[in-house]
Image: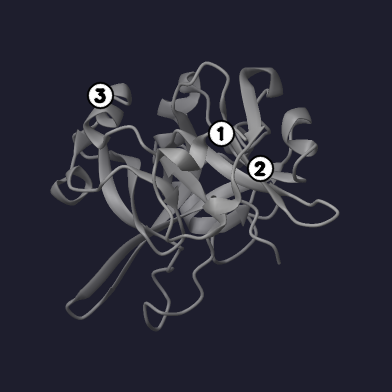
């Protein structure tokens, strides 16, 4: 199965991200560097509702459910909006443990005759994206892990020219509802699991340097 959203970037410093989302930073999240090439298994800054307001904490991208026998089992990086309420892997998390993954943009690859062409996709006005996610807490003995994955849906008109899927992007007016652990109503949640309006977004081709997860830096998001 091709990864539907398998790479994104967050170059905005995490302190600035925290101000933008009106959140407090945990120590580990505060130490996370800006990255132009975020890949699965990395620790990433994730916004969730804490006891005393919004928190940004570090989580591993790739979901390890609480019932996994060990932390190296199946680690999905995406959950499909259409089946997220049915699948045992996600159904508790979508009802109770929703989160947002801040991003400056995400990457998607368009199939071409010779090779795949990577695109950088973001907001037309350059503002931060809030990618819809779910998180899980796993613990065995002294070991514990907080992990997350990104919810994906059908492409909007802009994305459809590049790929048939896209991450769910939560609009600012819906942040509070999406993050509210008390909101478990399926219909209310599904209303937010829709493609983001295409006219508020933009996409442009970039260098294939992004294909290698070892590459990082502002040159990755330069248009070609």
Is disc 1 in contact with disc 2, using a CB cutoff of under 8 Å?
yes
Q: Position of residue 85 (x, y in %)?
A: 62, 53
Q: Position of residue 181 (x, y in %)?
A: 39, 41
Q: Residue furthest right?
A: 113
Q: Is the N terminus in the top left, top right, bottom left or bottom right quadrant?
A: bottom right
Disc 1, SS: loop
Going 27% across and 24% down the picture, which residue do you hit?
Answer: 22
Give the vertical position of 173 relative to 216 (above or below): above
**How many residues crowd around disc 3 within 10 Å: few (fewer than 14), some, or many (20 or more)?**
few
Residue at numbered disc 1: 169
Q: CA distance from mark 2 to mark 3?
A: 26 Å
**How many residues crowd around disc 1 within 10 Å: few (fewer than 14), some, or many (20 or more)?**
many
Disc 2, SS: strand
Q: Report if residue 51 is visible in the image.
A: yes
**How many residues crowd around disc 2 within 10 Å: few (fewer than 14), some, or many (20 or more)?**
many
Residue at numbered disc 3: 19
Q: Report if residue 101 is visible in the image.
A: no
Residue at numbered disc 2: 166
């Amino acid at each position: 199965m091709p990864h539907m959203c398998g790479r994104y970037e967050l170059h905005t410093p995490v302190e600035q991200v925290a101000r933008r989302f009106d959140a407090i930073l945990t120590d580990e999240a505060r130490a996370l560097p800006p990255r132009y090439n975020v890949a699965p298994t990395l620790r990433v800054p994730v916004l969730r509702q804490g006891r005393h307001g919004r928190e940004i904490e570090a989580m591993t991208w790739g979901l390890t459910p609480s019932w996994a026998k060990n932390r190296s089992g199946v680690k999905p990086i995406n959950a499909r909006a259409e089946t997220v309420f049915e699948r045992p892997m996600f159904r508790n998390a979508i009802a109770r443990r929703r989160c947002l993954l801040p991003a400056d943009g995400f990457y998607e690859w368009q199939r071409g005759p010779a090779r795949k062409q990577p695109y950088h996709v973001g907001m037309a006005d350059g503002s931060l994206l809030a990618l819809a996610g779910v998180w899980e807490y796993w613990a065995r003995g002294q070991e514990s892990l907080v992990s997350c994955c990104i919810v994906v849906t059908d492409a909007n008109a802009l994305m459809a020219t590049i790929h048939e899927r896209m991450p769910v992007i939560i609009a600012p007016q819906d942040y509070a509802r999406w993050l509210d652990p008390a909101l478990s109503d399926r219909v209310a949640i599904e209303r937010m699991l829709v493609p983001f309006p295409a006219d508020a977004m933009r996409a442009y081709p970039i260098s294939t340097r992004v294909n290698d997860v070892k590459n990082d830096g502002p040159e990755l998001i330069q248009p070609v």
